[in-house]
Amino acid sequence: MAVDATLPYDDQNIFAKILRGEIPNRTVYEDDYALAFHDINPQAPIHVLVIPKGAYVCWDDFSEKASEAEIAGFVRAVGKVARDLGLVAPGYRLLANTGTNSHQEVPHLHVHLFAGQPLGPMLVR
Ligand code: 5GP
């Protein structure tokens, strides 16, 4: 079910549990600011989720409230994951859903990184 991105952060969301180590994940990369792991239901040959370690509901919440260090750390982590996976030359797509119209399901900011094949049009037509 899509979430209302204006609600307060819910620390029982699935990615909060992953960050606390209560639920396993297939980690691709981790540093002080970010965790990257394989999506449980991949929509492309490579489908990685990158999440900030801080408690932010969505891109809006993060861009408004995160510190400069958190923002820089998270953005750099997304780029590093793509580089480490060798995706810059073949290309990749980033996507961050916010709120109901985008069908955001997990209320902890995550950037989807899709790659591994031509990815088609940006949006369903
Ligand atoms: P959203 O629709 O919120 O942008 O995307 C949520 C993503 O989280 C979906 O692609 C879904 O497959 C993924 N996901 C949901 N639960 C889990 C989980 O427990 N583990 C992992 N690795 N991915 C999950």
Image: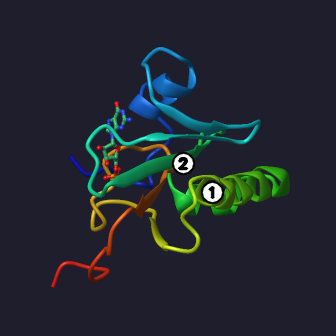
What residue would you read off at disc 1? 78
Q: Which quadrant is the C terminus positioned in?
A: bottom left
Q: As rendered, which of 80 and 52 lies closer to the eye? A: 80
Q: Quadrant of ligand 1?
A: top left
Residue 32 x, y percent position in the rendering: 77, 36
- Could you tell me which residue is drawn at 30 percent across and 58 percent down? 44
Number of numbered labels in the structure image? 2
| Amino acid under disc 2 | Val
Residue 40 in the figure: left or right of residue 33: left
**Image spot of residue 111 (x, y percent):** 49, 56
Image height of 77 relative to 25, above or below: below
Residue furthest out toward the top: 22
User: In the current view of this chain or complex, which residue is farthest to the left?
Assistant: 125
Check the image and report above or below for 19 versus 3: above
- Contact flag, marks 1 and 2 (Cβ < 8 Å): yes
Earlier sequence position, callout 1 versus callout 2: 2
Q: What's the distance in space between the residues labelled 1 and 2, CA to CA?
A: 6 Å
Q: In this view, does 25 lie above or below 36?
A: above
State the residue position of label 2: 50
Depth order, front residue of 4/75: 75
Q: In this view, does 60 lie above or below 45?
A: below
Name which residue type carries label 1: Val
In percent of the image, x 19 and y 78: which residue is there? 124
* Residue 98 in which image quadrant: bottom left
